[in-house]
Amino acid sequence: MIILGIYDDHNASAALMINGEIVEAINEERITFIKNDVGFPKNAVKYLFKKYNINNDNLDFVGVSSSRPSAEQYNRLSAYIGIKDYKYFYKNYYNKKFNNINIFQKFIDKKNYSFDKSLYYHVNKKYNNKLNYSNIAHQNTVRQVFNDFYKISKNKIQFIDHHTCHLSHAYLSKVKKTKGPTIGVTVDAFGDGRNQTVWKIKNNNYRLLADSNQCEIARIYRMVTLYLGMLPLQHEYKVMGLSPYAKKNYSNEIKDFFNTIIKLDGIKFVHRSRPKNMYTHIQENLQNYRFDNISRGLQDFVEENLVNLFKNIYQSTGIKNFVYSGGVAMNVKANKILHQNNFINDLFVPAAPDDQGTSIGACYEIARLNNIKTTPIKNYYLGYDINDKNSNYLKYRKKNFKFKSEKLNTNKIVNLLIKGEIIARASGRMEFGSRSLGNRSLLASPNKNNVVKKINELIKNRDFWMPFAGTICSELANSYIKNPKKINGSFMTIAFDTKENKCNFAAATHPYDSTIRCQILKKEENHWYYNLLMSFYKKTKIPVLLNTSLNVHGKPIVMDEKKALELFKETPLKYLILGNKLLTKIK
Ligand SMILES: [Fe+2]
């Protein structure tokens, strides 16, 4: 049984399931190298079909993780436009009903943002000049794309409810199922008419307990991100990272303001007073407050509301085990507050809880509906494999760019890290989702004073207030990180408090509240990386390596040998682990 899942909106992706196992998943952006590329993931699908010899004869189903069209899909809007454009967009067109694609043309500067960028736009136009924007017309467009470009029968394409995809990703990918019933919670900006759901799950049966289309948490976060001069759908994590610096006394009023928009009614969010235009409403009401206090007020609003939601769910069901996904589950700080409450025993957030993970969720959901036994996802190294079989890359030497290549030696890497060197690693299979988990990472010792500055100047150009993340081996985690419930920390989706007086890895924690968004690594997940961490620990007694994604600021994470070498060439990085080789730049 072969199932393809796609997500075709902002940060599009595709996933392939063979006999119940997700064998590969990839974001479109990694191939096109356009950050958060949006629309039909044609390159990702092509890549999967080629690698696994998929065609109409052996493919059983295609699952599409939403059945409604969006403005982004029809012009690849969010991959191209900037802050100024977003402000224009939200000021003028927020809350409009888009019934026809032509309306998009009115709010987009056609000179700069051509509709030619979107595959859906072209295919739709080819078959229907009216550019009808109904759900059915959109679904026919998607079917037509599969038929035209991949020769896949239209009847194999299924549109799967978006929130059920979020849920199935979280529940069915989880490695250790807890005994008894589980609660599934999804919270996002919007998908197939909803932005919040609550489910009771027992033996793969889902029972909907509540849902809402009035949960504005994600939208409010998005609009505040824009109001603070950052990119919506992308920089929400920066607003979250800013929040610990502000004092509660100064931000309480701001939190109260957000609470005038929505409220919790039992286990669902409802409008208290929904403004017609969310962006201008936020702009008008927050103009006299400072940026850091705004971020704190917002984060407190989110945390308090989520805590109350989960508490109410526990009180009405008596269940303490949760799986949780949707874009709001990307908020690692709120996830930390949740798992620290005593009404939660277990909280699982999958590696890509946001929309990009719904391609995986669509595969799982089709399998579940067809009673196909599925395999959980042990690790998220689900992408392109850099190994020494493709050693042609060593020919990649250009003018002014020479490097020596040697067999990888863990001890040598440890010694370089101790000296304060930054090591890039592009080796093994690429991670799926936004988090680098060691295979497409920049690694550094987290106890060097200047390491943050050094990484920023070398490559990352990260905002001055933002923390870096880190990896710790599972057998060391208990000594350094507060995680008494053994919450799954494999995927950097949950933050933890660090143990006081034991933190000699400050550069991998938040500089103000000393929390860590860490990857708690089990040996079976990544042998080489685990051994590196343990060797580093044995020599230094530092249990953590700073781990940040291998990309240039604003660009996607590198996928293959070519992109890794380009990054190596274009940045002042001195060391790159590529496959099983260590490359050292020669000046
Ligand atoms: Fe979503």
Image (cartoon, rainbow, N blue to C red):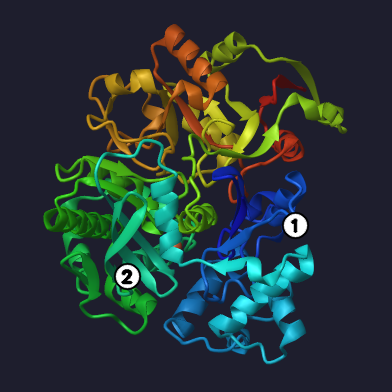
Which residue is at a point 27% across and 38% down the rendered structure image? 513
Residue sitting farthest toward the left: 315
Q: Can residue 291 be seen in this view?
A: no
Which residue is at a point 15% across and 46% down the rendered structure image? 343
Which residue is at a point 51% across and 58% down the rendered structure image? 366
Question: Could you tell me residue 330's position as x and y percent?
Answer: 40, 51
Quarter of the image that includes the C terminus: top right
Comparing 112 with 579, the one in front is 579
Q: Earlier in the sequence, mark 2 or mark 1?
A: 1
Q: In which quarter of the image is residue 302?
A: bottom left
Residue sitting farthest toward the front: 371
Q: Name the residue under label 2.
A: 216
Comparing 127 with 393, the one in front is 127
Using a 10 Å C-alpha cutoff, classify the residue at mark 2 as few (fewer than 14 neighbours), some (14 to 19) or many (20 or more): many
Up/down of 307 relative to 497, above or below:
below
Question: Could you tell me residue 145's position as x and y percent?
Answer: 71, 70
Q: In which quarter of the image is residue 208?
A: bottom left
Residue sitting farthest toward the bottom: 130
Q: Residue 310 carries which label?
A: none
Q: Quadrant of residue 10?
A: bottom right
Question: Could you tell me residue 516's position as x and y percent?
Answer: 35, 34
Comparing 578 with 200, the one in front is 200
Q: What amino acid type is highlighted by mark number 1? A: Asp
Which element is circle 1 on?
Answer: loop
Q: How far apart are marks 2 and 1 (CA)?
A: 44 Å
Question: Could you tell me residue 171's position as x and y percent?
Answer: 38, 48
Q: In this view, does 303 lie to the left or right of 15?
A: left
Up/down of 412 relative to 258, above or below:
above
Which residue is at a point 51% across and 25% down the rendered structure image? 444
Q: How many labels does the image show?
A: 2
Q: What amino acid type is highlighted by mark number 2? A: Glu
Q: Mark 1 points at which residue?
A: 57
